[in-house]
């Protein structure tokens, strides 16, 4: 609840984004870990407290200039009391575990709680900074998500700091599928877990092996590899540290289980096997599901690697145009001198990036002046080749 | 000036296919199949093989693009083609 109040109140959100350690408890705003100087000239940490005035779920302009303090009375850098803010020093108990040792009074027309709290903090922590230049109330604490509806285990402060919550909300609540957790699929997953997609369904029946570690985000330990985890188990366990909506499916898709794709809002197809891809794509088209299908072809010539990193984006509007660009070439059919399996982490990662961007473009997070159904990066020329309907 | 020396305009065009220079008789267009044949000496074929063909530094009106089966493109000196089976992920 308090996180919601912070998210809805621009003054509190600004404080959070600036790194102050906020807590809302029993109608009071607490700023924790505010450095101050005690009478011996030592820097210590206290809590600045203010009553919160609210209208519904948001703060209003504070009418009360008084603040409270848990800790010794703050002093100037020389150890003399800051008398300019001094008021009563009778201990007070506000309930809910909120207790104050001192009351401060510095009259001003405070515009909002950011203005009020940072004004007091400036006076108090400013003295501490004279003693210890590294002392700051802007500690950037890790903030757990206390809202049950939040998909993350901790607050997405990157989005709030950037002020693009409304933009990113365009994919919030979606059910996303990632088929294949090889190199590209794993990097797609890495990026999708940073979004507010409600459910991220990952599909792969394979084991996470040592060679996979070199084409996957993160750095598994030797012990991680020795237990030979299933790919979906390994990734679901790791990323559940952050995202609450990961749904692992330890299967290879085929006709018998392709119904697992029904109801998904968007699907990333990152698999090598043509026949499986046909089954999957037939189903997605029948369901009207937009999807991104990725693949690369890298060949070695005179000791250098070249080739194409490709994305095909198929939506109900681009089905026909996209169709001839989808690769149904099969892993097993390549018994020839050109059959190679050259993939490098940065190419997998690039492939994933353009696919995730296409998803976000489809749902309006990124501007897209011409919707592309084909995007191919030419390693040799360094150019992106696009095909669009317009 | 060329005309004064009675030099004829070049009758070949050099393009680059998967990093290899290919000098071709000057002609208007290359088909998808011709580009694949330039990329591989013995192109594997069959249901399990599929090629992605894309080009850059082509003619002005569409300097970059793709070719799928049945399509062709006008070639130009220095035009670059990439031809691979883009099925790995």
Image: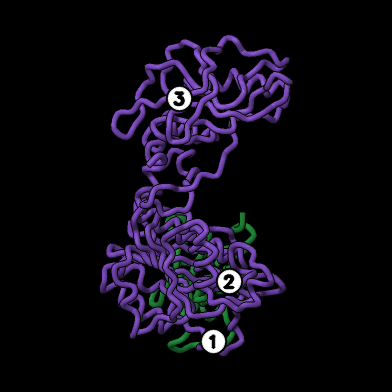
Mark positioned earlier in the residue sequence (3 or 1): 3
Q: Is residue B19 visible?
A: no
Q: What is the spatial separation of the Cα atoms under label 2 and label 3, in whole angstroms?
A: 70 Å
Report x, y in % for residue A163: 44, 38
Q: CA distance from mark 2 to mark 1?
A: 21 Å
Q: Residue at x 59, y 67 (%)?
A: A216
Residue A358 placement: quadrant: bottom left
Is A209 rendered above or below residue A32?
Answer: below
Q: Which residue position is annotated with label 2? A: B17
Q: Secondary structure at mark 2?
A: strand
> Are there few (<14), some (14-19), or many (20+) residues within 10 Å of tag 3?
many
Between residue B1 and residue A88, name the one nearer to us. Answer: A88
Location of mark 3 (residue): A50
User: Is residue A190 among what the camera can see?
Assistant: yes
SS assignment at label 1: loop
In the image, which lettered chain appears green? B
- Between marks 3 and 1, how big is the CA–CA gap? 70 Å
Q: Which chain does the purple colour mark?
A: A
Q: Nearer the viewer, residue A259 or B21?
A: A259
Identity of the residue drawn at 49% across and 26% down: A49
A285 displayed left or right of A133: left
Q: Who's the residue at 30% across and 28% down the image?
A: A55
Mark 2: give few (<14), some (14-19) or many (20+) Cα within 10 Å.
many
Image spot of residue A180 (x, y percent): 47, 74
């Amino acid at each position: 609840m308090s996180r919601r109040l912070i998210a809805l109140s621009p003054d509190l959100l600004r404080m959070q984004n600036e790194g102050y350690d906020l807590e809302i408890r029993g109608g009071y705003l607490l700023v924790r870990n505010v450095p101050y100087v005690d009478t011996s000239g030592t820097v210590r940490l206290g809590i600045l407290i203010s009553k919160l005035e609210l209208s519904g779920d948001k703060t209003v302009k504070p009418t009360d200039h008084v603040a409270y303090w848990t800790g010794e009375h703050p002093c100037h850098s020389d150890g003399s009391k800051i008398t300019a803010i001094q008021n009563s020093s009778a201990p007070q108990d506000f309930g809910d575990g909120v207790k104050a040792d001192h009351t401060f009074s510095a009259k001003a027309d405070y515009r909002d709680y950011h203005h009020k709290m940072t004004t007091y903090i400036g006076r108090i922590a400013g003295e501490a900074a004279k003693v210890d230049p590294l002392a700051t109330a802007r500690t950037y604490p890790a903030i757990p998500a206390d809202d049950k509806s939040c998909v993350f285990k901790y607050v997405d402060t990157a989005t709030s700091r950037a002020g693009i919550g409304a933009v990113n909300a365009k994919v919030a609540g979606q059910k996303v599928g990632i088929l294949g957790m090889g190199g590209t699929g794993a990097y797609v997953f890495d990026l999708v877990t940073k979004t507010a997609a409600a459910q991220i369904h990952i599909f792969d029946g394979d084991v996470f092996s040592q060679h996979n570690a070199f084409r996957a985000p993160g750095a598994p330990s030797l012990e991680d590899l020795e237990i030979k985890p299933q790919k979906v188990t390994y990734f679901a366990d790791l990323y559940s540290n952050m995202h609450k909506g990961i749904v692992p499916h330890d299967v290879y898709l085929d006709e018998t289980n392709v119904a697992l794709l029904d109801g998904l809002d968007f699907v990333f197809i990152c698999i090598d096997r043509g026949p499986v891809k046909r089954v999957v794509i037939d189903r997605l088209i029948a369901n009207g599901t937009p999807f991104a299908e990725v693949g690369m072809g890298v060949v070695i010539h005179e000791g250098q690697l070249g080739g194409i990193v490709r994305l095909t984006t198929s939506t109900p509007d681009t089905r026909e145009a996209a169709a001839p660009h989808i690769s149904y070439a099969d892993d097993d059919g390549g018994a020839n001198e050109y059959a190679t399996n050259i993939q490098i982490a940065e190419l997998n990662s690039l492939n994933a990036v353009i696919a995730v961007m296409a998803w976000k473009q489809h749902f309006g997070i990124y501007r897209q002046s011409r919707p592309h159904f084909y995007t191919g990066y030419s390693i040799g020329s360094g150019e992106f080749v696009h095909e669009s309907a317009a | 000036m060329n005309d004064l020396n009675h030099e004829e305009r070049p009758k070949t065009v050099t393009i680059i296919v998967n990093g290899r220079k290919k000098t071709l008789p000057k002609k208007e267009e290359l088909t998808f199949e011709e580009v694949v044949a330039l990329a591989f000496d013995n192109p594997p074929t069959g249901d399990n093989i599929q090629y992605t063909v894309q080009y850059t530094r082509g003619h002005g009106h569409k300097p970059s693009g793709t070719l799928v089966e049945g399509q062709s493109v006008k070639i130009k000196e220095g035009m670059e083609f990439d031809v691979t089976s883009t099925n790995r992920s």
